[in-house]
Every structure is written in structure tokens, then in C-alpha cells.
Amino acid sequence: MKKLVLISCLLVVIAILACTQGNKNKIATAYGNFTEDSIKKLAHAFFQPIPAVADNQDNAVTDDKVQLGKMLYYDTRLSAKGNKSCNSCHDLQSFGVDNQRTSIGDNGKKGNRNSPTVFNAALHNMQFWDGRAKNVEEQAGMPILNSIEMGIPHKGMLVQRLAKVDRYKELFATAFPGEKAPLNYTNLEKAIAAFERTLLTPSRFDKYMQGETAALTMEEKAGLVTFIKSGCTNCHNGVGIGGAQMQRFGLVTDYRTLTGSKVNDEGRMAVTHKVSDKDVFKVPGLRNVIGTYPYFHDGSIVQLDSAVKIMGKVQLNKQLKTEEVNSIIAFLSSLTGDIKPSAKNIPKDLVQD
């Protein structure tokens, strides 16, 4: 009798262990149970891991260009009054943003659009909220000549200013060897862009995409499923988790009714003058989104949960539940990447003794 009881107990224990082992491969989500393998397949259908460098065949990333570009990026001499550098609005100590709704320019005036992060921007298919620049090379020189942002009146003025600095003459000559006049505005743009092409932030999500299943928590994996199944990947996909297309903000309803936006920014229509481009903006990349607040083109929303809810309503016509929002945010937290310490150090040539 005792043997029968013992055998029965052992069979129960074995059954429980088998059930537990089977459930280890199951992850409960807002859309039902998913296995580790099915979540991986979902992820690889919509995303790619980050590369080591976002190279450009027309502007090869070299150490000399990056050194020059970094110095230019931090140098306030690239603004008319010397009050602003690229880093002022795209702070590398703060996820590549200044966490302001809109940034203050060289003359003390505020711009009308939120400063997007510079980290991973080189992975995107266009630059600026209205997509007017095709890459970071085109983008790099535009804020410098913007009357509100950095206020340099014309390219020649800045070239002449930098030509008076011996260190710049050396750096330009080294970065662009063989050129008769290497210190020019085009090379300035290329150098800044080369530096920006190194500003990539690999995250735990990239480790997961590369095969490290344990890189994400169960909650983050469930959030990944929620993010995909909710329809967020219609726009936020690829290596940048966005940044690959233009889209109307407010496919379902006018976004202004939910964001409380004070400025009537009509988006890409300001560039193309086409009515069909009204309220069309670049889809932002979501890498490091936890730290790149405030959100949207006008910085109208500070809290990420509010931004997720608004996107669900105005883009997907969904009233996302609190647990769905929290699940999505859990996934988004896995996109916070590692910033190279060297990128955050101001170049010695710019440090005052």
C-alpha cells in the first residue's frame, strides 16, 4: 500500500514538473499565450538589430573625419553669437535631446518644433520632422544657417571664421587629404555627419534580436507582442523602430484634440505646399524613447503613457487599456541603449584652461 502511495506521489510530482517545464516556454500576453520561438519570429518579421556603424558610401566614416566632426559638433563657434553648438539642442549627455518642448536658438528665440534625438538618426531614411533632408549629411549644415537656430548668415562667413583657427586647418587637411581647399562647408557637413554616424546605441533588444533570449524580461517580451499586435509596427519598424517613412499624424482624428497643441503645424505641407501633405510628419524612431521626452513634433506631451494612448487613438482607432499601455512601455524600455562614453566627452581642443 505504501509503495502504491509513493508511486502515486511520484507520478504527481513528475506531472507537475513536466507541466512547469512546458510553461517555461509560454509567455502570457494581452493577445494570449506565445512561445519563445513564436515571439522571436514576430520580432524578426518587423525589426533588425543595430549595425556597428551607419556608413555611407558617399561619405566613408574615418577616424579623422569623426575626430573633426566631434569637435565641430561641440563648438559654439558654429553659431553667430557663439551661444549654441549642435550639442546644445542634441545633448549627448541626455539621449541626444534637450528635453525641452522646443529649443532656444542663438538669439534667445524658441523654434516651433521639438528637437529630435541625434542618436541613431543616421539609420533613418530622412531627417527633420518634415523630411526635407535625405540624410545626416544634408541635415548637418541646415540648422547652422537657420536664423532662429544657430544664425550663421551664410556659409562663407563660417568658413572664414574657422579658417582663422589653426587646429581646424590641421583637422580638415587630415580628414580630407589631397584636397586643395579642404576647409569648406561641404566637408564641414560630411565631418559632422561622420561623427553622427557613430552615434548608435545598441540595446538589450539588439542582444535579443541577435539570439540572447534572456536579454529581455518576460514582461518586455509580452510588451513586444502587444506592440506588434496592436499595430504599432505599421509605422515603427525596421532597424530604427521608426524613421523610415512619413505618415499623417491623426489618421483617425485630429491629433490636436488630444495633444492640446498650441501651434497649428501642418507638417510636410510647408515644404511641398501640397494639401495632401497636411499634418504629415516623419515617423520618429523609438530607440531610447524612455529618455527623449517631451514627445511629438511640438513636444506637446511629456508623459510616455499619454503619448502611447494618444497614438493608439489617433493612428489606430484603439482605446488602449492601461495594461496594454504598460506592456508596450515595458517593451520600449528595452530599446534604451548604451551611449559611448567617448562621445560624451567635450574635445580637449574646446576645453578652456
Image (cartoon, grey):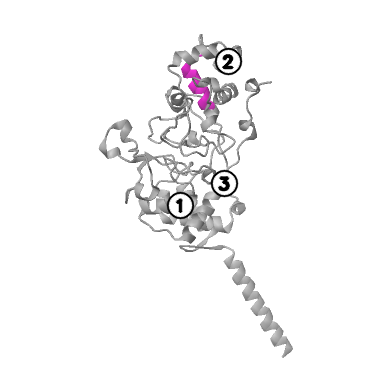
Comparing 94 with 224, the one in front is: 94
> Which class describes the residues within 10 Å of circle 3: few (<14), some (14-19), or many (20+)?
some
Of the residues tagged 2 and 3, which is closer to the observer?
Answer: 2
**Cα separation between marks 1 and 2:** 46 Å
Q: Position of residue 8 (x, y in %)?
A: 66, 83
The three-letter amino acid code for the residue at tag 3 is: Gln
Residue pushed farthest bottom?
1
Residue position marked by numbered label 2 in the rendering:
168
- For marks 2 and 3, the one nearer the N-term is 2
Of the residues tagged 3 and 1, which is closer to the observer?
Answer: 1
**Cα separation between marks 3 and 1:** 31 Å
> Which class describes the residues within 10 Å of circle 1: few (<14), some (14-19), or many (20+)?
some
Report the residue at 51% width, 32% height from top. Answer: 89
Look at the image and tell me in which quarter the C terminus lies: top right
Residue 307 lies within the magenta run: no
Residue bounds of the magenta highlight? 183-194
Q: Secondary structure at mark 2?
A: helix
